[in-house]
Amino acid sequence: MLQSTASAVAPVARTATARAPRTPRRTNEVVSLVTIDITVPGTASTESRRALHTALGDDLRLYVMTIDRANERVTFRAEITARTLDDVISAVTASLARATLGRAVSTMLRRPRQR
């Protein structure tokens, strides 16, 4: 049979000490990031770029454009923040009527909260 060898310990009274004020905790916000491939017929990209900027505005974070002269099409791979995949698809199809949508990926990323 086992017996405890610990003696009874009286609780220690804590004294109130002044703590330094906490610095505000830096929090992050979670933002949607959509990456989508958009193909538009033709070899002139100016009109398509303007339509893309008009449709997505400041949420358009980055795009890479490829012009395929042999098949007469322009392909954009665009990254859009702060919008859902459904919002991006509806905005793109409303502004680029002849566009073909390709691979689309929606993820979430953390970024410092704007103050």
Image: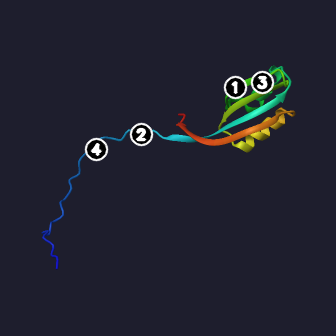
> Which of the numbered marks, if any, corresponds to residue 64?
1
Q: Do the residues labelled 2 and 4 touch (CB within 8 Å)?
A: no
Name the residue located 55 percent from the left edge and 41 percent from the top edge. 29
Tell me the CA gap for discs 3 and 2. 42 Å
Mark 2 residue crowding within 10 angstroms, few (<14) / some (14–19) / many (20+): few
> Which of the numbered marks, if any, corresponds to residue 90?
none
Tell me the CA gap for discs 4 and 3. 56 Å
> Which of the numbered marks, if any, corresponds to residue 49?
3
Could you say whether the residue bearing mark 1 is in a helix, strand or loop?
A: strand
Tell me the CA gap for discs 1 and 4. 52 Å
Q: In which quarter of the image is residue 93?
A: top right
* Nearest to N terminus: mark 2 or mark 1: 2
Query: Of the residues shown, which amino acid type is indicated by label 3?
Result: Arg
Mark 4 residue crowding within 10 angstroms, few (<14) / some (14–19) / many (20+): few
Tell me the CA gap for discs 3 and 1. 11 Å
> Which of the numbered marks, if any, corresponds to residue 24?
2
> Residue 91, position in %: x, y?
78, 37
Query: Of the residues shown, which amino acid type is indicated by label 2?
Result: Pro
Could you say whether the residue bearing mark 4 is in a helix, strand or loop?
A: loop
Could you say whether the residue bearing mark 3 is in a helix, strand or loop?
A: helix
Q: Mark 4 points at which residue?
A: 19
Q: In front: mark 3 or mark 1?
A: 1
Q: In front: mark 4 or mark 3?
A: 3
